[in-house]
Every structure is written in C-alpha cells, then in structure tokens.
Amino acid sequence: MIKWWKILGALLVLYTIVFGFLGPVPRLDILNETIRNVYFHVPIWFAMLFQMGVSLWYAIRQLSTSDVKTDLYSYQAAQVGLFFSIPGILTGCLWARFTWGTWWTFRDPKLNGVAIAILIYLAYFILRSSINDEQKRARISAVYNIFAFVMMFVFIMIMPRLTDSLHPGNGGNPAFGKYDLDNHMRLVFYPAVIGWIIISMWILDIRKRLAVLHHTIEHE
C-alpha cells in the first residue's frame, strides 16, 4: 500500500520538474537560464546529506543497542546517500560548464571536499565487505560511519566557508537565497527540497525491507 507521504513526494518532484523548466526565473548575468539547475542540484544534495544523517543516526543506535537491524539500516542509508551524490555531482558539473567554463576545477574547495567525502564513504563500503563477523562488522562500521559523517561535514560545509570558493554562499560569496531567489523561484525551490528528501526516504524504505528480508533468508 502506497503511503500518503510517498504520493506527496512524487507530486512535489513532478511539480518541480514542470515548473522548474517552465516557470519564470530572474535574468542574471552569466547564470541566465542555468539558474533553473538550483531546483535540482541543490535539493538533490540536501537529500544526500539527509540520508547520510540518517545513516549516522542508525550508526549511533547500533553502538548503543547492538541491534543488527540498525547496522543494516545504517548501511542502506549510506548507499542511498551515495546514490544521490551521483546526480548531485553530474548536475554540478553541468552547471559549472556553463557558468565557470569548465566541468571541474580543483580551485574550488567544495568540489574537492565532495570528492574526498565520496572516497571516505567508498572506504566505508570496502571496510564492511572485508569483515565477516556480523557483530564485529556492525560495531566497526558504526564507528567509521560517525567518522565519515564528521569528515564529510568538515570538507563540504566548513572548509569552503573558510577559504576562497567559487560556490555561492562560500568563501565570502553571497548565497543564492540572498540575492538571486525571487518569490517565484522560492515557490519551486522549497517544494523541490522536500520532494527529493521524501523520494530518498521512499528509496530507503524499500532498501530497508529488502535488506531485512535478505538477512532473514540468510540466517534461516
């Protein structure tokens, strides 16, 4: 049975896609029509950060309860978060190509921080696959997950604000919300953030049920 919040998420994303491409946007130098990408690039990253936060929460619960399910849920949330990082990077690269003239630049600490954060989480998946004992894997993975989230937050949210950065809202640059988002854009942007987060929750819900089912079959 499809729950109401899943329908809401689908409708919000559909609304975002339609009005994101057809709705009015401010005519700004350099950005021009590419400002529409703010409806997709930024909300998708919000969904990724949300899922990594969910993974952290389950990791903390694993250390406090030693429940195997919390480890499974933490792992699934991290996978969903990493999945959302892919379209997040692709939409970011596309935006950079039209506004900065390049697909990627190592001059931007936020781009570098994103790349490092993804590598840190990839190491988390490798670590899990290298440990056979279930309880040991759960505890070590939970500890590393906490470390990974803290490092991701430092590389993505803190360091870009302390150094020169090309990204809006970082390195002394004004954020989009301060100057560029008008009332028409806010009517699409905020539903987009909510919609993509709900879609990420829907994907996690499916993966959690599949993970528990697979775990139950393995231990019968």
Image: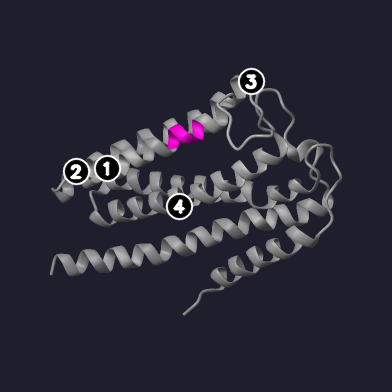
Q: Are marks 3 and 2 in contact (CB under 8 Å)?
A: no
CA gap, disc 3 and disc 1: 33 Å
Question: Looking at the image, which residue is at 33% across and 51% down?
Answer: 75
Q: Position of residue 199 (x, y in %)?
A: 53, 62
Q: In this figure, which residue is indicated by the disc labeled 2?
A: 130
First reached walking from the N terminus: tag 3 or tag 1: 1
Q: CA distance from mark 4 to mark 2?
A: 21 Å
Element at label 2: loop
Q: Secondary structure at mark 3?
A: loop
Q: Amino acid at mark 2?
A: Ser
The span shown in magenta is 113-117
Q: Within 10 angstroms of label 1, few (less than 14), some, or many (20 or more) residues?
A: few
Using the numbered discs, state the Cα–Cα distance from disc 4 to disc 3 in whole angstroms.
28 Å
- Where residue 112 appears, as percent x and y from the top left, is 51, 30
Contact between labelled residues 2 and 1, with CB atoms less than 8 Å apart: yes
Image point (77%, 56%), residue name: 187
Mark 4 / mark 1, whichever is N-terminal: 4
Q: Looking at the image, which residue sits at the far right?
A: 27
Q: Which mark is residue 116?
A: none
Residue type at mark 4 is Phe
What residue is shown with label 1?
126
What is the CA distance from the residue labelled 4 to the residue labelled 1?
Answer: 16 Å
Going 83% across and 47% down the picture, which residue do you hit? Answer: 182
Number of residues whose C-alpha sits closer than 10 Å to that of mark 2, classed few (under 14), some (14–19) or many (20 or more) = few
For label 3, the residue is: 164
Answer left or right for 189 relative to 93.
Answer: right
Residue labelled with disc 4: 83
Residue 151 placement (x, y as % from top left): 43, 30
